[in-house]
Amino acid sequence: MKTINLLILLVVTLCIHQTARSQSQIFKGTGVRYSAGIETGLATGYLATKYEGTLGVSAQAEFPIVEGDLYSTLNAGFNNIFTTATYAHLVDDLHLVPFKAGLKYFYRSNLYLQSEIGFSFLLNKAKCVEGKNAAFVYAPQVGMIFYLHEKDYIDAGVRFESNSKFYKCDHNNNFIGFRIAWGFTL
């Protein structure tokens, strides 16, 4: 059964890669790229003891440093990190607004590595010992672009996001996230 599942996964991956590769030749978008997306994720580490997962939105702009290969990025959004039922009476959901900047490197025409740093601002104070309103955030990501037409595409990526602690009684707030976005050039 494992062999069949692995074989199916390999065939699907190769088909997606070949489709994206052939479609990349029709993409004519150059210059600044924009994208708006939906994000979701699962809490990891210490954060997973009190929180389940995340749901949010984000907007991103990518400025070419080396056209088609390397871009600088600016990203802003909103993330809601949901409390588990066990801790719902002790802590509130976390409402975060992250502002990040970084680099996005395409090592193939449609496959990329991205790394961003910035700050997350806490919109609500949870029921805990006093804390800060802002925390440092680091978010490495790997993803794939699916070119649709001459100037628009779908951007799908998986990332690890780590926020430093907001409260004295907490640790770093880490989660593994998935972002799917519609992107375009003007």
Image: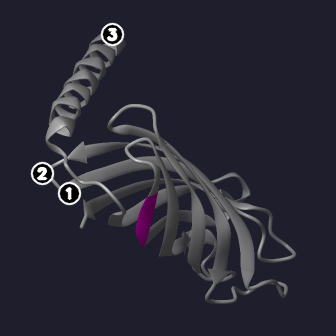
Q: CA distance from mark 1 to mark 3?
A: 37 Å
The range drawn in magenta is 57-63
Q: Position of residue 48 (x, y in %)?
A: 64, 58
Tell me whether the residue at label 1 lies in contact with that at label 2, contact meaning CB atoms closer than 8 angstroms.
yes
Tell me the amino acid under the disc marked 2. His
Viewer-closest of 88 and 105: 105
From the image, tell me which residue sits under label 2.
Answer: 149
Q: Is residue 33 magenta?
A: no
Pointer 1 and pointer 3: residues touching (CB < 8 Å)?
A: no
Per the image, the residue denoted by label 3 is 3
**Disc number at residue 33?**
none
Label 1: few (<14), some or many (≥20) within 10 Å?
many
- What is the number of callouts on the image? 3
Q: CA distance from mark 1 to mark 2?
A: 6 Å
Q: Secondary structure at mark 2?
A: loop
- Residue that badge 1 annotates: 152
Q: Residues within 10 Å of mark 3 (few under 14, many from 20)?
A: few
- In depth, the one of 56 and 64 nearer the eye is 64
Q: Position of residue 34 (x, y in %)?
A: 34, 66
- Helix, strand or loop: magenta stretch: strand
